[in-house]
Image (cartoon, rainbow, N blue to C red):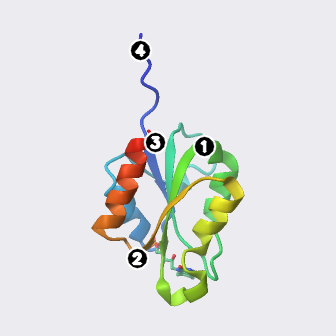
Amino acid sequence: MICLGDLMKIVYDSLTGKTKHFASQLGFPVIDIQDCLDSNVQGPLFLVTRNAGYGEVPESTLTFMRKHYRKVIGIAVSSNRNWGHYYGAAGDTLQRIYKIRLVVKFDGQGTESDVEITRNFISKHS
Ligand SMILES: Cc1cc2nc3c(=O)[nH]c(=O)nc-3n(C[C@H](O)[C@H](O)[C@H](O)COP(=O)(O)O)c2cc1C
């Protein structure tokens, strides 16, 4: 029997719905990060996360990554340019700590181009 492996899933960390909207446009099943914190989830996974003030990584994303980072193939981060120097900094931090590619920093819920860049990355790496 040929094993095709597990299908890619998108995990999103959303406070006001923008990362959820972005995640739902990528063309893969989506999972709320809150449903992965205590339970197991099969990889491969792509993470869509956000910032929690002064470029901090949200606690939920940190908890998720500690448990599941080995399955994460890439990261996208919803950001806001009003934060200036801290624009999308949570994504930079995750990339630095886990050596996982930050594919795109996007404003709010992202543009069509942000979605396409992310889709292309996932297709090449899944
Ligand atoms: C309390 C708070 C702090 C934020 N801090 C930053 C930040 O440091 N850098 C940044 O680029 N965006 C920052 N943002 C913007 C969020 O990353 C953005 O609003 C969020 O990703 C939207 O996603 P969501 O609708 O899925 O929650 C902040 C937003 C909030 C509400």
| Residue named by callout 3 | 125
Identified by mark 1, the residue type is Ser
- The residue type indicated by label 4 comes to Ile
- Could you tell whether 16 is left or right of 91 in the image? left
Q: Earlier in the sequence, mark 3 or mark 4?
A: 4
Callouts 2 and 4 close, C-beta under 8 Å: no
Asked if marks 3 and 1 touch (Cβ < 8 Å), the reply is no
The residue that mark 2 highlights is 108
Which of the image's four quarters has the C terminus?
top left
Q: Residues within 10 Å of mark 2 (few under 14, many from 20)?
A: some
The disc at residue 2 is 4
Of marks 2 and 4, which one's residue comes earlier in the chain? 4
The Cα atoms of the two marked residues, 3 and 2, are separated by 25 Å
Give SS at disc 1: loop
> Is 57 rendered above or below residue 100?
below
Q: Earlier in the sequence, mark 3 or mark 1?
A: 1
Query: In the rendering, which numbered label is found on residue 39?
Result: 1
SS class of the residue under badge 4?
A: loop
Label 3, label 1: how many angstroms apart (C-alpha)?
Answer: 25 Å
> Which residue occupies 36% across, 71% down?
110
Could you tell which of marks 3 and 2 lies nearer the N-terminus?
2
The secondary element bearing badge 3 is classed as loop
Residue behind label 2 places its C-beta within 8 angstroms of ligand 1: yes
| C-alpha distance separating marks 1 and 4 | 28 Å
* Residue 98 found in image quarter: bottom right
- Residue beneath the point at 52% across and 52% down: 74
Mark 3 belongs to which amino acid? His
Find residue 98 and name its label: none
Q: Measuring from the top left, give residue 79's x and y in whole percent.
A: 49, 76
| Occupied quadrant, residue 118 | bottom left
Of the residues under marks 1 and 4, which one precedes in the sequence? 4
Q: Nearer the viewer, mark 3 or mark 1?
A: 3
